[in-house]
Image: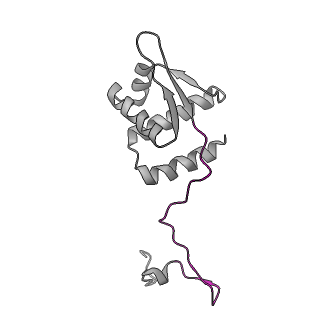
Amino acid sequence: MNLFDLLANFWRVDEQRNFSGNETRLYFFLIHLANRSYWPEWLEYPDKRMAANANVSLTVLKSARERLKSGGLINYIAGGGHRVKTKYQILAPKSDLKPSPYYINTKNKKSNIKSNGKEKGFVHTGSDFD
């Protein structure tokens, strides 16, 4: 697992899922913990400390990690009760993810010149704001 692949994968999934700041903070804090612990397969961390580090309530923490799990970024086994820590697993990026549809790069096959969306309805005026 490569740190840069994890970051690129997070932002690719974020474009589709639109994660909140709390969910983003939780994911990057988990990456920090994994890196600090030399990338074990599973991390154990108490919910109350996780909520305190992320500066969120326990209910927000639980919904944030559920959204990250549904996005395919993490897996977790919820702890519960006294002294039972939640176990987190950072998942490797899936290789079948498609790039974001926002980048349109077309190429005119006849003249071999990139049009950068001009044929798709983009009006190029030469302004800095195009």
Please determine whether, in this image, residue 13 is positioned above or below residue 68: below
Q: Nearer the viewer, residue 49 or 78?
A: 78
The furthest residue to the front: 96
Q: What secondary structure do most residues of the magenta stretch adopt?
A: loop
Percent x, y for residue 23? 42, 39
How is the model colour-coded? Answer: one colour
When the figure is inspected, residue 70 is found, relative to residue 86, above or below; the finding is: below
**Picture residue at 43% right of the left edge, 84% below the top:** 125
| Residue 87, percent from left and from top | 52, 23
Left or right: where 33 falls relative to 129? right
* Residue 92 among magenta residues: yes
Q: Position of residue 60 (x, y in %)?
A: 34, 31
Q: Position of residue 2 (x, y in %)?
A: 66, 42
Asked whether 90 falls inside the magenta stretch, the response is: no
Q: Which residues are magenta?
A: 91-116
**Above or below, 24 relative to 37:** below
